[in-house]
Image (cartoon, helix red, strand yellow):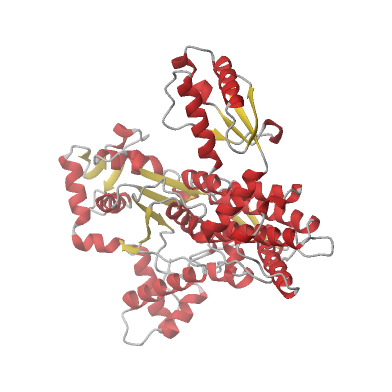
């Protein structure tokens, strides 16, 4: 990679001045193209050791590099307080194309920053008493994409679904099923949805409503998720912890560590000792567990299996962050090893009108309803186009519309267009030749170079998206790449009377590199790469 060449050159320049080079020399792309292709702040980082001010050291580095010009470098300049900016020859982009084509989808933009560390990503956490609804969709798509990103950068990822399968709601669910089976109304506070009637009709007469209903809801969840390409490695049952005694063990450990106390018959966690605004009840005075006790036991169990945890929860769990980190710290874990991401709410619109939902009553928009309406690819992409830190509004009519202003269509259409151009070239007698037989240096049109520059940024974009847990960065990057491709497609014919056979071959390989980059993005976002639309 050209970055390694530049880092080596900077290291040699520092060594020539008797300055110890840093272990990792940082390079980044200047915000403005006129400032060059790459920039390094190494002069600012090492100026003190060099006994110079950063600008003075930067100037000395530029002088050395001008006299000992690295490969691909057209010019070097010092900027600002001491940044060293490199302007590169276009041949570095041809080198990028060759690297991408050789790496293919499996290896391009695949990194090893995770070093094989095991990491657990828990997301959705739904009650197995109804179908997944639209409120689960954002966390589902986000969590799976985060897991895909972490896998791409070298972590060993486990996807985990926490089943809230204990308590009053499960009993009401079973009673509602039984009532509908008898042709009666559900009990007060029970579930009124049409799905209850449908599932009750499926339920055998001799079935246990709780166990049968549990299995039916779980099957529904798995089927819905599989439609959008989400598969979990672990389905963890809350009630299994009650049966195994893990919750009692956890409460005993908290007491042994003197981080819990009993007051007025209730057991409390001393969470204020760890940054919480108040202590939290673990066991009520009547002996009933609060939701926090099994949650602590669950996280204690997860830490016995994984060194690093990521939880993805909805906006209603915001207050959960401090208290759970406090509990894990009380148990001796580093709170930084428990990462909690909160997804903000999504408003669905159709025809300018808000689509409302209500879970208990049953008149809700299910996850399946959305998939049925817009398809699995659009479902995933529309939820990933925006940071989960912000509230999102999705117009179902707009995302279903196949037009250029629809970002979902815009990106997938680029992929289909590339396949069309490749097929057209083959039909006109221009099948792509082996890369070794093609002269890439003929790619000099600004549209070609712009497309190559976009492709070259994918590895660093993947690393950033993985580190920041931001799949929307990949979604945004795919839109930028699609825009660069559509510009190229408009201005640069692959086959034509005024296009040489040599240029046709180089452009076919440019199309292949673009396909590879898009395929990596589509995989990270969990969507298909259509060859025609």
Q: Is residue 36 above or below residue 192?
A: above
Where residue 464 appears, as percent x and y from the top left, is 51, 43
370 relative to 159, above or below: below
- Marks counted in the figure total 0
**In this view, which residue lies farthest toward the right?**
497
Q: Splitting the image into 4 quarters, where does residue 363 fall? A: bottom right
- Give how far across and how far down residue 262 sits, in percent: 20, 41
Residue 269, compared with residue 185, is above or below; it is above
Q: Measuring 47% from the left and 58% from the top, which residue is drawn there?
A: 144
Q: Residue furthest bottom?
A: 205
Q: Tell me where residue 231 appears, x and y as whole percent.
A: 42, 66
Q: Is residue 392 visible?
A: no
- The part of the image, by quadrant, that contains residue 318 is top left
* 290 on left or right of 265: right
Which residue is at 34% across, 69% downward?
A: 171
Residue 49 sits above or below residue 333 on the image: above
Residue at the image point whose x is 23% and y is 44% from the top? 267
Looking at the image, residue 485 sits to the left or right of residue 462; the answer is right
Q: Position of residue 378 (x, y in %)?
A: 62, 64
Quarter that holds the C terminus? bottom right
Residue 374 appears anywhere in the view: yes
Is 404 on the left or on the right of 38, as rendered?
right
Q: Nearer the viewer, residue 227 or 428?
A: 428
Front position in the image: 111 or 221: 111
């Amino acid at each position: 990679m050209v970055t390694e060449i530049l880092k080596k050159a900077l290291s040699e320049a520092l060594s020539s001045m008797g300055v110890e080079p840093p272990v990792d020399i940082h390079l980044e792309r200047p915000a403005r193209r006129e400032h060059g292709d790459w920039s390094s702040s190494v002069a600012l980082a090492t100026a003190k050791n060099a006994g110079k001010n950063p600008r003075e050291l930067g100037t000395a580095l530029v002088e050395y590099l001008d006299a000992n010009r690295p490969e691909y470098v057209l010019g070097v300049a010092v900027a600002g307080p001491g940044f060293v900016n490199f302007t590169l020859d276009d041949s570095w982009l041809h080198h990028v194309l060759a690297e991408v084509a050789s790496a293919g989808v499996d290896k391009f933009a695949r990194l090893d920053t995770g070093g094989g560390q095991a990491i657990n990503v828990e997301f959705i956490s739904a009650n197995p008493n109804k179908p997944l609804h639209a409120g689960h969709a954002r966390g589902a798509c986000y969590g799976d994409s985060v897991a895909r990103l972490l896998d791409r950068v070298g972590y060993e990822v486990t996807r985990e679904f926490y089943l809230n399968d204990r308590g009053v709601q499960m009993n009401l669910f079973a009673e509602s099923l039984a009532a509908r089976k008898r042709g009666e109304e559900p009990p007060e506070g029970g579930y009124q949805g049409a799905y209850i009637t449908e599932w009750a009709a499926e339920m055998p007469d001799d079935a246990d409503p709780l166990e049968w209903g549990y299995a039916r809801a779980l099957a529904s969840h798995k089927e819905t998720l599989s439609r959008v390409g989400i598969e979990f490695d672990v389905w963890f049952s809350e009630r299994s912890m009650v049966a195994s005694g893990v919750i009692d063990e956890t409460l005993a450990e908290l007491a042994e560590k003197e981080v819990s106390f009993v007051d007025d018959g209730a057991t409390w966690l001393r969470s204020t000792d760890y940054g919480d605004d108040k202590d939290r009840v673990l066991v009520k005075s009547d002996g009933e567990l609060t939701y926090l006790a099994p949650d602590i036991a669950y996280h204690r169990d997860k830490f016995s299996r994984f060194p690093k945890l990521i939880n993805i929860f909805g906006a209603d769990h915001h207050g959960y962050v401090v208290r759970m980190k406090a509990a894990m710290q009380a148990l001796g874990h580093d709170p930084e090893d428990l990462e909690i991401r909160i997804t903000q709410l999504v408003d669905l619109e159709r025809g300018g009108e808000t689509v409302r939902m209500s879970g208990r009553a049953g008149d809700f928009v299910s996850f399946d309803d959305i998939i049925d309406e817009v398809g699995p690819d659009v479902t995933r992409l529309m939820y990933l186009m925006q940071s989960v830190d912000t509230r999102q509004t999705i117009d179902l009519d707009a995302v279903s519309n196949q037009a250029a202003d629809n970002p979902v269509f815009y990106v997938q259409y680029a992929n289909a267009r590339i396949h069309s151009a490749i097929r057209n070239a083959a039909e006109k007698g221009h099948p792509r030749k082996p890369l070794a037989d093609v002269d890439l240096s003929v790619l000099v049109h600004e549209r070609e170079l712009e497309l190559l520059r976009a492709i070259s940024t994918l590895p660093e974009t993947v690393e950033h998206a993985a580190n920041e847990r931001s799949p929307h960065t990949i979604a945004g990057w795919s839109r930028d790449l699609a825009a660069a491709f559509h510009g190229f497609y408009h201005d640069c014919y692959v086959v034509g009377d005024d296009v040489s056979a040599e240029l046709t071959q180089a452009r076919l390989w440019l199309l292949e590199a673009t396909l590879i980059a898009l395929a990596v993005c589509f995989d990270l976002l969990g969507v298909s790469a259509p060859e025609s639309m």
